[in-house]
Image: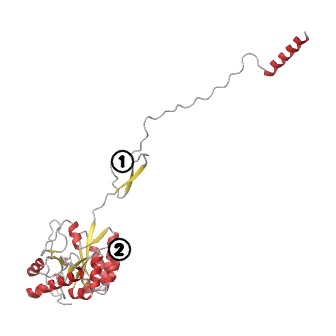
Amino acid sequence: MGKIILISILFGFLISLTGCEGEPPAIPPQPARAAVTTPTTAPSLPLPTSPPTTASAAYISESNSNSNNYMTFEYEENREPRKLIALTFDDGPAIYTPYLLDALKERGARATFFLIGRYAHSRPQTVLRILREGHEIGNHTYNHRNLVMIDYEYARWQMAYTNAILRGITGEYPAIMRPPFGIHNEQTADIARDLGMSLILWSIDPQDWYHRDTDITREHVLARARHGSVILLHDIHKPSVIAAIQIVDELMSLGYEFVTVSELFEYMGHEMVAGAVYREPPRPSEDSAPVCTDDYNEDTAGECYVRQYYEY
């Protein structure tokens, strides 16, 4: 009997500890999770439908050849048409020519040198350097005689003997020549044709040999330079060499490239013909050679020399 009472007391005590009457309190529900969708295909980046039109712009495209599907950069450049100019120097090689060559090499500019035969003979190392550094060499006669004032045989000797000197130094005959003072006639053209040379005049002449002023030379050229111009200067005069370097710097900053005469004609799609006369590569509806008059005329835009009959 006593055992029954003790068990009843213990059972009642346990019920009081739980404090539960009827059903226990319900567990609060967990917050609902957001639905997760799994894509059926890999997301793709928007790609341009065509290459960018700005120069040197980059765009992204997928590399099909890469197994890891890395993204690669492709560079497309919309190049501007090249702006080329031929810088030419007459009457050298001279004492200032090596200095000029240093400056041209430093700037990556090429030029054309119309050499006097007797000077080339006395400075063969300078002649070789001109050729080896990517410049072009032309014939400017042996001692700068006016070719229309001498007979056929002497005129031919002036050109042929200079060719022999240049070939003896460089191993090559020149393909171009410039008659002294820019003065020529049918006889001059016939001789040049026989010797395989085109006659190259110029389209910009600052008369640097006359005033020998660096500023005048520079400003004259910069005011007239355009794609396809052939500029006449003289590396026998220090002011001209200084002006040439300034001209190169200024025009390069405007996007111009300096090339040889032959490179200029080739780029502009014109093949020079032996015996033909050019002042610059022919343009549509323009004559390829100027008419030289007895006196310098501003109407010719400096295309021809004043007829100063001097020799070297």
- Residue occupying the far top of the picture: 1
Q: Residue at x 32, y 75 (%)?
A: 248
Q: Is residue 56 left or right of residue 90?
A: right
Does residue 100 appear in this view?
yes
**How dense is the environment of label 1, judged by Cα within 10 Å: few (below 14), some, or many (20 and up)?**
few
- The picture places residue 90, in percent across and down from the top left corner, at 23, 82
Asked whether 212 or 232 is in front, the reply is: 232
Q: Which mark is residue 48?
A: 1
Where is 28 relative to 214, above or below? above
Name the quadrant of the C terminus.
bottom left
| Quarter location, residue 10 | top right
The type of residue carrying mark 1 is Pro
Picture coordinates of residue 133 (x, y %)? 30, 76
Q: Along the line of sight, which residue is nearer the eye, 88 or 117?
A: 117
Is residue 54 placed above or below 98 in the rendered structure?
Answer: above
Identify the residue at image location x=88%, y=14%.
6
Q: Are the residues flagged by discs 2 and 1 in contact, CB closer than 8 Å?
A: no
Residue 85 point in image, percent of width and height: 26, 71
Front tag of 2 and 1: 2
Query: Is residue 225 in view from this perspective?
Result: no
The relative height of residue 115 versus residue 258 in the rendered view (above or below) is below
The colouring scheme, among rainbow, by chain, secondary structure or one colour, is secondary structure
Q: Which residue is mark 2?
A: 107
